[in-house]
Image (spheres, coloured by chain):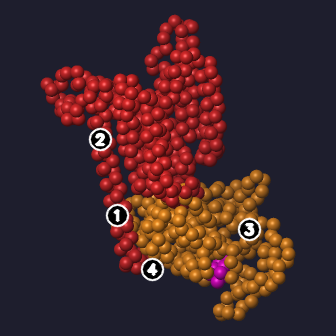
Chain colours: A red, B orange
Amino acid sequence: MTLVVSAPAKASHALTSLVAGRRRIGLIAVIGLAGACLLVAIVAVGQGAISIPASRVADILVAKLTGNDTLLDGRDVLVVLNIRLPRVLLGLLVGAGLAVSGALMQGLFRNPLADPGLVGVSSGAGLAAAATIVLGDRFLTGTMMMKLPFAALPAGAFCGGLASTLALYLIATRGGRTSVATMLLAGVALGALAGALTGLLAFMSDDRQLRDLTFWSLGSLGGASWTKLSVVAPIILPLLLLMPLLARGLNGLMLGEAEAYHLGIPVQRIKALTILLVALAVGASVATAGLIGFVGIVVPHLIRLSIGPDHRLLLPLSALGGAMLLVGADIAARLIVAPAELPIGIVTATIGAPFFLWLLLRRTSLIDV
Amino acid sequence: MSEPTPILSSHGVSFLTGGRRLVAEASLNLGGGTTTILIGPNGAGKSTLLKLLTGEIKPASGDIRIAGEPLAAVPAWRLACLRSVMAQHARLIFPFSVYEVASLGVDGIGRALPRPRREAIVAEALAAAGVLDLAGRRYQTLSGGEQQRVQFARVLCQLEAGRSVAERQILFLDEPIASLDLCHQLALLDMARSIAARGVAVLVVLHDLNLAVTYADHLVVMDQGRIIAQGPPARTLDDALLRQVFKVDLTLSRAPAPGLPFLLPQQHRGRPAT
């Protein structure tokens, strides 16, 4: 059963401690990041126009969970349970979904610059949202004399995102094999086209529509509600639950598609499942929170720089990191210009980009593009 | 030598692309315990034949059977237990460590094995490929030759992990020594032969004719998509064949080791193979 030579004892001992060390670091990172994420979430529930201390937030949540309703009265309970909690949960979900989608796309396309937008979701969703904002009012007010229904924008964005992903997938699939290189290039072309059409719509729009459009394209977690959450959660959660199934396959794909096939990985199934899950999760994120850039590209790279590129750790850590980053950014978005709110995309980019650059300057050798 | 049933057999296999016939009517058996070495000029179809035999691409016509079953009918995961493949070059985009790259060989098909066993397989393979002391390094920072040895370690891992499932295995090596120095070239080929001695069928694509005749039990010569000669090295090669295939004047000699042919380029015929 030995492979011709047995490992020299000393080197093999060093290897054992190396592997054990890696595993310990991974475990510490998962636990630490999960704890930090929880902490940020509790702070986020307390912060805002009305400040509620973290201990009171914890009391309210525990009372609600244990069904002890006697403690649940007062205005702060209403704020916590009906406004802040759904908002924070939405932030956790969207942040985790975007970061995991980014990690998956970079792995699938074997390209460190890939982001969730690459599968065409963002461009398609953006175009559909712009069309809803600019053209929706005209058609509806012209014909039925009513205001555009509240759900039209997210629904339109979601459908637009899925439609453009489907188009890309069909373009890039020949004879049962999907070429990720073709998909990447077609994604760029389709993105440019959608961008041009979105620009045309912006050109046609009036001042109010232009403002809606701008705000939507910068993203916001405002308007979160339990209803919205109950629609979004079943679409994003499958990505988070099924990602462990994709980790090994994506690790193998790092060597190339042929090598992954030689390793026994069902390459086409991994590709199709990844694209489907990402399209759904990003579609749902964009539909409810607008276009939030940066999370999908920065969080996975931060994890790779600090822990390593193994997807079995990268995916869960990205989920935690993305959730924490987005909820943290939402705190800043609500506090900086309170009682008004900044679009969250502005916050994620202005905090995240310099931090990322600083990290790159310190440890350039870790990324070879 | 009595011929047991081959682990892999191909019969009249052809592959076409863009109207060009890259492999034509190739028939080849890979038997357990045999080191088969495939030689031929650039563009002869060696790598394409290898891709056909590993199942990576499907032949336009012809029949390939592995362990008695049609190759196309064997699912990817079982194929991965039956055969291990080292391709010409593998580039990595993200900073995986040497240990992680080698582990890829056991992570998939070795999932059922207990973790200490998996780790032992990786450690042994790294040692066998001579890269154990590089285990903590990032793959991208290694030299081309070191990377090639890490890939060899990964392939050894897969072979070892697959052994618990498949009794009869095949090892494919496509120009495995292209970036190696002479010492490591010989070490890798020695290793390939000792794996064959364990009952594995080994197929190696090589360019160095002297190493090919030294290490081959069975030599296969390809030119323009066709297998034009195959058999034991001493009986397969002759001056005329070499001149025809490689477009250089070579004289086959039989000096150093008893019975082994060796060759030295005499003079170039002035026309590179096209």
Circle on res. B42 = 3
Residue type highlighted by circle 2: Leu
Q: Is residue A270 visible?
A: no
Residue A34 x/y as whole percent: 31, 46
Kindly indicate whether the residues beneath marks 4 and 2 are on one polypeptide chain. Answer: yes
Residue named by callout 4: A5
Residue type highlighted by circle 4: Val
Circle on res. A38 = 2
Task: Residue at 70%, 79% (x, y): give it.
Answer: B209
Which element carries disc 3, helix, strand or loop? loop
The stretch in magenta equals: B211-220
- N-terminal label among 4 and 2: 4
User: Where, by quadrant of the figure, is residue A16 drawn?
Assistant: bottom left
- N-terminal label among 4 and 1: 4
Classify B97 as above or below A73: below
Task: Residue at 49%, 14% (x, y): give it.
Answer: A148
Which element carries disc 1, helix, strand or loop? helix
